[in-house]
Image (cartoon, helix red, strand yellow):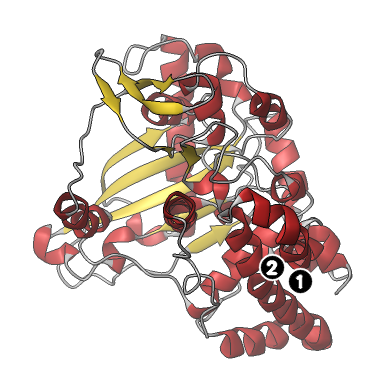
Amino acid sequence: MYEFPTGVERLQEQLIGYFPAEGAAIRGYVAAVNATRKASGLYFAEKAMPRPVARIAGGLMRAPFLRWAGRTTLEVLRTLTSNDDLIALLTGQWGNYGLPPAQSSFGIHAVVAGHYFNGGSYPVGGASRILDAIRPLIERSGGQVVVGAEVAEALMDGQRAMGVRMADGRQFRSRAVISDAGARNTFERLVPGPNIVTDALVRLPQSMAHLRLYVGLKHSRGARPLGDNLWVHPTPDHDANVERFASDPTAPFPLLFVSFPSAKDPEFTARHPGHATIEVVTLVPYEPFERWEESRWRHREPDYDAFEASLAVRLQAELERHVPAVAGRIDRAELSTPLSTRHFMNHARGEVYGVAATPERFRSRVLVPRTHIANLYLAGQDVSTLGVTGAMFGGALAASAVLGKNLISRMTKPRR
């Protein structure tokens, strides 16, 4: 077992302690991550610039980041070391960006790994507090937050967006339409008729799907708290692990990420005394679930229910093997599958991170806030990076493009 402490200096010392002969490689790795993160500022800022300006300066702004992001994580690390065990350790958190080292862009690896150099964070009170903090500002500005309001399509006047039509028939007109439904969802589902972006998007692969086991635990007073995130891999060869599971779903899971949300929230115990929560996540291909994709949530065929149950049992067994303290204390366990993601998120193949974080993704010129359709903008992780932070940053990029203001300069400065 290897530990990743908080703080880049402490982490570097710890890694050198594990691999004393690889000091130069480890220092080179930290330098490469920091250089990539620094270069990412201009790369993402260019996305929000007006097209005439981007045509003049865009290539120069993108080039420093693409020097790193245009290569795979494995290609970059091979220039630093030939030690496969060190490479496996440095890329052990590949689940955070959804692709193993031979497929992922080093750009996304550096952005994510560098983010965690100074540790992660968790909203006090749980994820709903993010909405609680943002909603008053939206409403004070004249906006409204609604749920269960499905958009059927964008209203168009030729090549100009002018609002949206809801699934219930209502229409809303606006001077700007901003979509965070994902690039492919936007152009394949919401914009009627063929368009020039779809073909370019189809050539970019979608990210992997995932399984997530939600566990409720009986947690007696005085019990030792659970806290550290765990990354578990069947072998050090991450790419081979993915290939093995893709060809045989009974093979070991390609990775396991075990986290303890309740232990990260100082208010949880007061709200739910005697309980704790755990999540167990793995990344999987969509193909094993494809034959059930037209069935309805909670009304799927018995063979799907049996398959889902077998996966839940396996994930729970892995949890109890790696965290033996939970054995006998699990009160409830519920599994979400790629079909759950398809149902709730409208991601056609259950993709968890939208467009896959390959080198091709970062070279692409279609994943930008301004689209070829006037007044239609993209937000979310597809125009930025992956996950919650990427989606928030994608919103800032879209807002910068709509307002014609630089709202992201402070966000692009790496933390020290």
Left or right side of 6 for 242: right
* Quadrant position of residue 144: top left
Say which amino acid is labelled 1.
Leu
- Three-letter code for the amino acid on which mark 2 is drawn: Leu
Q: Residues within 10 Å of mark 2 (few under 14, many from 20)?
A: some
Q: In screen coordinates, is 316 left or right of 110? A: left
Find residue 225 and report its horizontal and vertical position in percent.
29, 70
Q: Nearer the viewer, residue 171 or 148?
A: 171
Residue under label 2, please give it.
Answer: 89
* Left or right of 327, for residue 286: right
Q: Is residue 349 visible?
A: no
Instruction: Tell whether label 1 touches label 2 (CB within 8 Å).
Output: yes
Residue 95, position as x, y percentages in the image: 58, 52
- Image: 102 above or below 405: above
- Camera sees residue 254: yes
The image shows residue 356, relative to residue 70, as above or below, that is above
